[in-house]
Image (cartoon, helix red, strand yellow):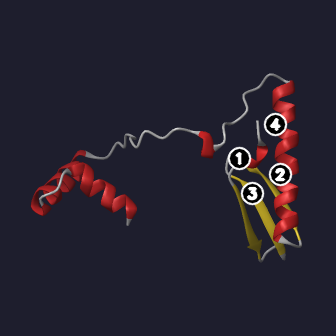
Amino acid sequence: MNIKHYTYRVTWSTEDGEHVATCAEFPSLSWLAKTPEAALKGIQKVVAGVVIDLQASGEAVPEPLAEKHYSGEFRVRIPPHLHRALALTAAEEGVSLNRLASAKLAA
């Protein structure tokens, strides 16, 4: 498992007065540092330690988002009245419901 394949983000924390680094695959972890580079190195060390602990205990290690395959499909449940309204809008615009929903999600 290459810990550099995980999804990291470094942002400024006004509250802490430092940069905070997080990892999307491990949302409960964070690392504060004075520079963005130090914050990134810190969170990567924490993630590496957690991955080692998970592997040692036989627990599942999250797959990096970058390595996952995405089909381009997902299901969303909506109320029937909203489904009807979207279908009408799609028909009026001369597009499929799928295309309309995709455009709305991208906006």
Reading the image, the residue beneath label 2 is 44
Give the quadrant of residue 100: bottom left
The mark lying in front, picked from 1 and 2, is 1
Q: CA distance from mark 2 to mark 4?
A: 10 Å
Question: Is label 1 in a helix, a strand or a loop?
Answer: helix
Three-letter code, disc 2: Gln
Residue 49 vs 55, above or below: the answer is: below
- Placement of the N terminus among the 4 image quadrants: top right
Reading the image, the residue beneath label 4 is 51
Crowding near the residue tagged with mark 4, few <14, some 14–19, many ≥20 C-alpha atoms within 10 Å: some
Q: CA distance from mark 1 to mark 2?
A: 10 Å
Q: CA distance from mark 2 to mark 3?
A: 9 Å
Q: Is residue 5 left or right of residue 93?
A: right
Reading the image, the residue beneath label 3 is 22
Reading the image, the residue beneath label 1 is 5
Residue 25 vs 86, above or below: the answer is: above
For the point 11% across and 56% down, the residue is 91
Three-letter code, disc 4: Val
Tell me where residue 80 appears, x and y as whole percent: 23, 45
Q: Is residue 89 visible?
A: yes
